[in-house]
Image (cartoon, rainbow, N blue to C red):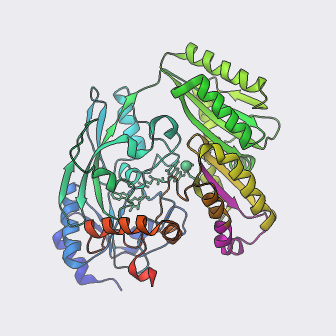
Amino acid sequence: VIDSTKIASLRAAFQGRLITAPEEQAPFLFDWRKRWKGRALAVVQPDTAQDVASILRWCNATHTPIVPQGGNTGLVGASTPDPSGTAIVLSLARLNRVRSVDAINNTLVAEAGCILAQVQQTAAAHSRLFPLSLAAEGSCTIGGNLSTNAGGVQVLRYGNARELCLGLEVVTAQGELWDGLRGLRKDNTGYDLKHLFIGAEGTLGVITAASLKLFAQPAAQMTSLAALRSPTHALGLLTLAQKHLGPALTAFELMSRNCIELVLRHIPAAQDPFSAQHPHYVLLEASDAEGQDHAQARFEAMMHEALEAGLIDDAVVASSLQQSAHLWALRENITEAQAKEGKNIKHDISVPISAIDRFVEQTNATLEQRFPGIRMVVFGHLGDGNLHYNVSPAPGVDPEQFMQQEPEVNAVVYEAVARFSGSISAEHGIGLLKRDTNAALKSPVELALMQTIKRALDPLGLMNPGRVLPTAESLR
Ligand code: FAD
Ligand code: 2HG
Ligand code: ZN
C-alpha cells in the first residue's frame, strides 16, 4: 500500500521531480537482467547535491529507506528496491554535469549521474583519456561505477574505478554534504574516507560528484583477435605480450567459443573473422605513445613470436578503426547475446592469474560431468585474473529447471574459487545476489569490521538495506 501522506510530505520537503505513477516508475524497479522486481514509495530525481541532502534528511526524519540508482546496469541486484514498497529510489540521473576539467592537473570533476561515455567524450575533447571502459558505458554512470568499483577492459593498464578517483563529494546517510573533491595525487591527512564510499554499493552514503584522473591519449592503437587452443596457451600469450609491450598492453580479454557463437547468433552485424572454429580467443589491444609505425612494428614482432612458439593458431590484426570496432563488438556483445539466449547463471570470479587455466580446466570438467550439455560461456579480463565464468543451459533444457540448479552450480564454482584462493566477486559487487554467500565466506573478524563501519555511518540502516551485508532479519 503506497503511503500517500508520506508522499505528500516528501513532495513538500523536496520541490524536484518525484515519480509516483506506476508506468513511469517501472524502469527504475527492475534490474538489467530482469531478475529482481521491486516496488517503491516514489522515485526521486534531484537536480543538485543540496537536493540530495534535503531528501536524505527527510528520509532520516521519516525512517524511509533509500536505494541510490545510477544507470541501473548493475548485475547483482543492488540498484532496485525490495518488494515492500517502503523505500524511495534515489535516481542520480539529473546530476549530470561535468563541473570542470583541469588539463594540466589531469583531472575532471563529474557529477554522479554523468554517463560514463559522456565523461570519456569530455576528456577526449580536452585531448585527454578517461580510461574506464565497459560494455555498459552508454548507460552506466560515474556514481554507479564508483559505488561498484567497476573494472572493465582496461584495468590491466589503468586500474579499476577506485584507482581512477582522487576525491568525492558525498551526502552522508544523515543528510550532510561532505566536499572531499580534492584533485590531489598526494594527501595523507588521516583516514582516506573516499575509499569507504567507493565499492559500498550505496550502503553508506550517496556519491554526488567525483574528481577523476585523466591520462594522455595514446598516439596509436593496435587491436587483434587471436585464436588459440586453451587458457594455458592464453597465459603463455599474456606473458609474451607483457614482455614485448610492457604497459602498452591495455587489454587482454579471453573468450570461449560458446561466447562467439552466442554473439554470432544474436547480434545481427557480428561476423566470425576466421574460417575455422577455435576453442578459445583472446582480444588484445596495445596503446602506443609513439605513433602508428612504432605500434605496428612492436605488435607484429610479438604476434610473430607467438605464432612461432605455437601459442596461437591464427590471428587477425585490425588495419582500420572500423575493423577494430568489429573485433571489439564480438567481445562487448557477449552479455547482451547471452541474455537474448535466455536465462543464465553468472559468476564474476578472480583467482591468481597463474591459476586461471587450472581453475577453468578443473571446474569445466566438474560442471560438464554433473550437468551434461551445460554450456560454458567463459570470458573476461584474463589480464586481471578475472573471468565471467558464466553458464547457459544445454539446448532443450527447461530454463526454469536450470535456474533451480543455481545453488548446486554455484557450490561447484565457489568451492573451486576457495581452493584457488580467489574471490566470488571481482568487479560486479555483492548486492543481493551474493550477499549471503559472501557473509558465509568472510572471516567473522572481517564481517564484524564491515558491520561496525555500516553502523557508524548509517546508524538507522536506511542506506540500501539488505544489500552487501545481511540485515538482522535476514540472519534470523
Ligand atoms: P547502478 O546499477 O544504478 O547501481 C549500482 C550500485 O551502485 C547500486 O548498489 C546502487 O545503489 C549504487 N549507486 C549508484 N549510484 C550511486 C551513487 N551516486 N551513490 C551511491 N550509490 C550509488 N561492470 C564491470 O565492473 N565491468 C564490466 O566490464 C561491466 N560490463 C557490463 C556490461 C553490461 C552489458 C552490463 C549490463 C553491465 C556491466 N557491468 C560491468 C556492470 C555495471 O555496468 C557496473 O556495475 C556499473 O558500474 C554500474 O553503474 P550504474 O550507474 O548502472 O549503477
Ligand atoms: C563484461 O566484462 C561484464 O563484459 C559483464 O563485466 C559480464 O555478462 C557478464 O557476466
Ligand atoms: Zn567484466
Residue 147's spot in the image, x, y percent? 38, 55
Relative to 16, 322 lies left or right = right
Residue 237's spot in the image, x, y percent? 68, 32
Determine whether 420 is above or below 273 in the image: below
Relative to 116, 88 lies left or right = left
Q: Quadrant of residue 10?
A: bottom left
Tell me, yes or no, if residue 253 can be seen here: yes
Q: How many labels, in total?
A: 0
Determine whether 166 is above or below 44 in the image: above
Tell me, yes or no, if residue 80 can be seen here: no
Q: Is residue 397 magenta?
A: yes
Residue 380's spot in the image, x, y percent? 61, 46
**The N terminus lies in which quarter of the figure?**
bottom left
* Residue shown at 39% from the left, 60% from the top: 201
- The quarter of the rendering in which ligand 1 is drawn is bottom left
Residue range corresponding to the magenta coloring: 386-411
Q: Nearer the viewer, residue 132 or 305?
A: 305
* Residue ranking furthest to the top: 293
Residue 23's spot in the image, x, y percent? 42, 71
* Residue shown at 65% from the left, 70% from the top: 406
* Residue shown at 60% from the left, 60% from the top: 418
Q: Quadrant of residue 371?
A: bottom right
Q: Nearer the viewer, residue 246 or 395?
A: 246
* Residue shown at 58% from the left, 55% from the top: 421
**The C terminus lies in which quarter of the figure?**
bottom left
Q: Is residue 353 magenta?
A: no
Relative to 106, 235 lies left or right = right
Relative to 247, 194 lies left or right = left
